[in-house]
Amino acid sequence: MNRREAVQSITMLLGGTLVGANAFLTGCKANDNNKNTKAFNPDDVAYLDEISETILPATSIPGAKAAKVGQFMTVMVNDCYDDNDQKVFHEGMGKLNDLSKTSYSNDFMHITPQQRHDLLVKLDTEQKQYMKTKKETDPSHYFRMMKELTLLGYFTSEIGCTQAHRYIPVPGKYEGCIPYKKGDKAWAL
């Protein structure tokens, strides 16, 4: 199974609820309607790596930065999101940094890991409230997009599939009932 097939499988399992789900289901083909695609620079990728690493930090297994989730996010935003979602995502990167400056008098890249965590917890609470009250035509919250892409990028990466999950490279027969002990890793798709 390649990465694209894994993304499509995960999207189907989630019921197509991700932002840009239609693009995921159709194979993330770039379309000509995205003429206003804003390029990401290496600083943006590093910034997104730090955001994703705060969401999924390294523990006994590598975190989101090691899985290059920041680069994954840029590809997904440019290739799979429509112009409106791309705009929300790019503006959200600025809003997150502005919130960091107002809360901690420094940009996100220069605050402590605990401050980053606290800031993202605050944003997660905000996005949950926003998503409860948003109309169908309203865009998704930018932090929800970042969080979804972090999870999707990490758990479809080699690190996510082989180190965060139990992994058998060549599966055997189907066994519908395998004993599970509390604390065991989930199986990779």
Image (cartoon, rainbow, N blue to C red):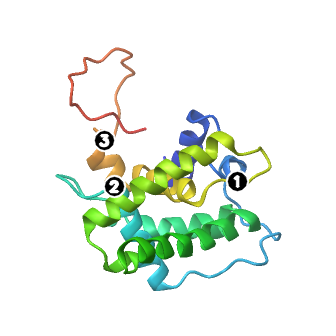
> Mark 1: which secondary structure?
helix
Residue lying at the far left of the rendered structure: 60
Q: How many angstroms separate mark 2 from mark 3 (CA)? A: 14 Å
Residue bearing mark 3: 165
Q: Quadrant of residue 175?
A: top left
For label 1, the crowd category at 10 Å Cα-Cα, with few meaning under 14, some 14 to 19 and many 20 or more, is many
| Residue for point 59% across, 42% down | 11
Res. 2 in view: no
Q: The residue under label 1 is which amino acid type?
A: Ala
Res. 74 in view: yes
Q: Earlier in the sequence, mark 2 or mark 1?
A: 1
| Residue for point 79% across, 77% down | 35
Q: State the image coordinates of residue 64 (x, y, percent, origin top left).
A: 35, 60
Which label number is shown at residue 23? 1
For label 3, the crowd category at 10 Å Cα-Cα, with few meaning under 14, some 14 to 19 and many 20 or more, is some
Q: Earlier in the sequence, mark 3 or mark 1?
A: 1
Q: Looking at the image, do the residues carrying marks 2 and 1 touch, with CB atoms under 8 Å apart?
A: no
Residue bearing mark 2: 56
**Above or below, 163 relative to 146:** above
